[in-house]
């Protein structure tokens, strides 16, 4: 019954996602196949299809600046921030925001020429409908933060925006709200919540978090302002910082427990849309490679494919993801990968392991565009992974089955021809 449910969701979501594509996908082939190896990233690929290290080139590390006291200011007359949190070591953080009375003024003050401003607003027409203070200005400040910390590859903020205008995409909106739940379409590179609660050995509170730029708003912050009557924001599942799309929060403990139980029991059905490098040979395939932590990553961030028996004492976690090609085309964004083969893929994770979709796609030779951790793409402004639909089969007394859908972001359509 659970598999049948996934197939129903796949058909519904596939139709919705494909309707926004410029071309129809070829007829599906539903057989299980070994993941293709001819397009594997240039990480080590040894022996058979499960044995990928997936330690794609990390690119040049950001220059580590020495701090004396507070975080270093990065602009003339900019005081930076006082009392930086534990996560702000060696980061340059501005205390002053870009300013402007409208979108065009903000872009001009960020360094764009009048010609560039015209081109950006033409390419990204939704931009002028965004909330200036909560969406446009913070995204420009985020790009300034990346530049200040050598994460734009030497490109200026103005040139980065002009080259890929959808880098300014940052739209918060609700896809559902009721007495118990608020379902948010989360923008990419926006945190779920604000880390709190650490103490030192003496029990004194530690400042665990410092906003990285003016307007560094989390989804929790946004919901707290929208629902001042909630005693706390309770997220019932997780969504990576880099991923956009459906995110469910509960207004009370009982509602949070009902929804979280569905995730624990794997009754929740999820569907994602990803833009990947390459043209998969099959229209549909399944990856069931086991996953585990990547010991080569000193930060403990990355996962990898694990083959039982290859390493003593290392056993991977069972994982399964299903894929269906929605569109094959070429990459349309200006930059190093312009004109490359890319595909839009519907993704249905059966299990819910950390970074499962990202690792399984890279393992098969089709890494996600913009995924700096599992691909060699350090040039694209976002990780092109979007949580498109979520179905929660509540009991009838709790309202029955509900499906929440976050429309495909405009940046996807802009990125593929």
Image (spheres, rainbow, N blue to C red):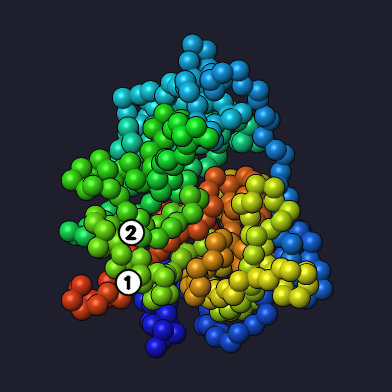
In primary-sequence order, the first of circles 2 and 1 is 2
Residue 322 in the image: above or below residue 251: below
Residue 74, quarter of picture = top right
SS for dot 1? strand
Please tell me the numbered disc located at residue 248.
2
Q: Real-space Cα distance between discs 2 and 1?
A: 10 Å
Instruction: Please provide percent x and percent y for residue 385.
Output: 50, 58
Instruction: Please provide percent x and percent y for residue 383.
Output: 54, 52
Q: Relative to the observer, which residue lies in front, 108 or 235?
A: 235
Please tell me the numbered disc located at residue 392.
1
Q: Is any atom of residue 80 visible in this view?
A: yes
Please tell me the numbered disc located at residue 383.
none
Instruction: Please provide percent x and percent y for residue 261.
Output: 35, 70
Q: Residues within 10 Å of mark 2 (few under 14, many from 20)?
A: many
Residue 362, quarter of picture = bottom right
Residue 66 in the image: above or below residue 210: above
Residue 417 in the image: above or below residue 145: below
Residue at image coords 58%, 78%: 286
């Amino acid at each position: 019954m659970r598999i049948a449910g996934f197939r129903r969701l796949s058909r519904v979501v596939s139709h919705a996602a494909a309707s926004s594509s410029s071309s129809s996908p070829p007829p599906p082939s539903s057989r299980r196949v070994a993941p293709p190896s001819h397009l594997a990233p240039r990480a080590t690929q040894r022996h058979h299809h499960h044995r990928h290290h997936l330690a794609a080139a990390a690119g040049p590390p950001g220059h580590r600046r020495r701090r004396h006291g507070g975080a270093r200011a990065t602009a003339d007359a900019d005081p930076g921030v006082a009392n930086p949190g534990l996560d702000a070591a060696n980061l340059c953080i501005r205390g002053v925001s870009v300013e402007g009375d409208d979108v065009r003024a903000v872009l001009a003050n960020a360094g764009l020429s009048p010609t560039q401003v015209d081109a950006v607003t033409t390419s990204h027409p939704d931009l002028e409908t965004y909330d200036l203070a909560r969406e446009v200005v913070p995204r420009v400040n985020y790009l300034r933060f990346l530049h200040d910390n050598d994460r734009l590859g030497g490109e200026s903020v103005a040139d980065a925006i002009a080259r890929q205008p959808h880098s300014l995409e940052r739209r918060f909106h609700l896809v559902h709200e009721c007495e118990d739940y608020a379902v948010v379409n989360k923008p990419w590179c926006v945190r779920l919540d604000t880390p709190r609660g650490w103490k030192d050995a003496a029990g004194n509170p530690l400042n665990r978090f410092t906003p990285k730029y003016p307007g560094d708003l989390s989804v929790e912050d946004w919901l707290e302002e929208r629902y001042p009557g909630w005693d706390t924001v309770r997220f019932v599942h997780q969504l990576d910082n880099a991923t956009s799309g459906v995110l469910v929060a509960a207004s009370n403990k009982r509602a949070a427990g009902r929804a979280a139980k569905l995730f624990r029991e794997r009754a929740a059905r999820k569907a994602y849309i990803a833009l990947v490098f390459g043209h998969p040979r099959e229209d549909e395939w399944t990856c069931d490679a086991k996953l585990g932590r990547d010991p080569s990553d000193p930060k403990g961030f990355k996962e990898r494919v694990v083959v039982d028996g290859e390493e003593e004492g290392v056993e991977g976690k069972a994982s399964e993801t299903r894929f269906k090609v929605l569109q094959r085309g070429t990459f349309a964004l200006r930059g190093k990968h312009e004109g490359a083969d890319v595909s839009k893929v519907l993704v249905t994770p059966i299990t819910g392991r950390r970074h499962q979709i990202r690792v399984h796609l890279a393992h098969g030779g089709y890494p996600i565009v913009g995924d700096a951790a599992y691909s060699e793409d350090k040039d694209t402004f976002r990780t092109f992974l979007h949580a498109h639909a979520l179905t929660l089969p509540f009991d009838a007394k709790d309202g029955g089955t509900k499906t929440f859908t976050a429309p495909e972001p405009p940046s996807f359509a802009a990125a593929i021809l």
